[in-house]
Image: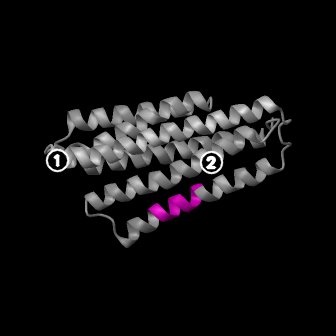
Amino acid sequence: MPPSTAYPLVGSALSALVFAFFGSAWLSLGLAATHQLTRATALVVGAGLLLLVLLASWVLRQAKRLPAPAARPADAVQARRQWQVFGLVNAGQWGGIFLASWLLPRLGLAVYFTPVMAVLVGVHLFPLARLFRYASHYWTGGAFLLWVAGCLLLLPSSQWQADVALGAGVILWGSAGYGLWRASHQLWG
């Protein structure tokens, strides 16, 4: 059964777009770290990104055909608050990444930068899951944290950058694909 309004579908599609782009960046970083970022692998990453973007665009187009939610003053206040909190959470994430990029090399711990960056990305998804009432972000954030922990515990530090990045890219693409699959399933009902 199609959703009654476009709001959840738009949220799923926008989230998928963000995850698709950042997943592609993580995959490219991982491939570059292993010296396997070639024209062929770049084409594969580009094709995956294009597929996810096209699917998200389709969901957005379908969502435009659904009725807009009834406008209420309380909804505008809630939306404004959501975007403020969203901005603060993302500012905290990017601030943490910037601080880690500056501090870790100065402490001789540069090898930890990619894992720390992935942890910050994973952790920032938890408040966003609650804020937007989108439970899949809990799973995505948890997958990030488990992946990083596994890499740190099981792999030599020389593999951390590549393997953390490749895993992060796969997790984000998987989450984007799952969100788009759910949205498509809701549309086709």
Compared with residue 145, is residue 23 higher up or lower down, i.e. above or below?
below
Is residue 150 something one can see in this rendering? Answer: yes
In the rendered image, residue 46 lying in the magenta stretch gets the answer yes
Which residue: 64% across, 42% down? 12
Magenta part mainly helix, strand or loop?
A: helix
Q: Residues within 10 Å of mark 1 (few under 14, many from 20)?
A: few
Give the x, y percent position of residue 120: 38, 38
Q: Indicate which label's residue lies in the foreground, 2 or 1.
A: 1
Give the x, y percent position of residue 141: 45, 34
What's the residue type where badge 2 is placed? Leu
Q: Earlier in the sequence, mark 2 or mark 1?
A: 2
Compared with residue 39, is residue 36 higher up or lower down, i.e. above or below?
above
Residue picked out by circle 2? 14
In the rendered image, residue 169 lying in the magenta stretch gets the answer no
SS type, badge 2 = helix
Tag 2–tag 1 contact (CB < 8 Å)? no
Compared with residue 102, is residue 79 higher up or lower down, i.e. above or below?
above
Which stretch appears magenta?
45-52
Give the x, y percent position of residue 159: 21, 48
Distance Cα–Cα, label 2 vs label 1: 37 Å
What's the residue type where badge 1 is placed? Arg
Q: Residues within 10 Å of mark 2 (few under 14, many from 20)?
A: some
Which residue: 20% across, 40% down? 155
SS type, badge 1 = helix
- The outermost residue toward the bottom is 39
| In-front residue for pair 182/145 | 145
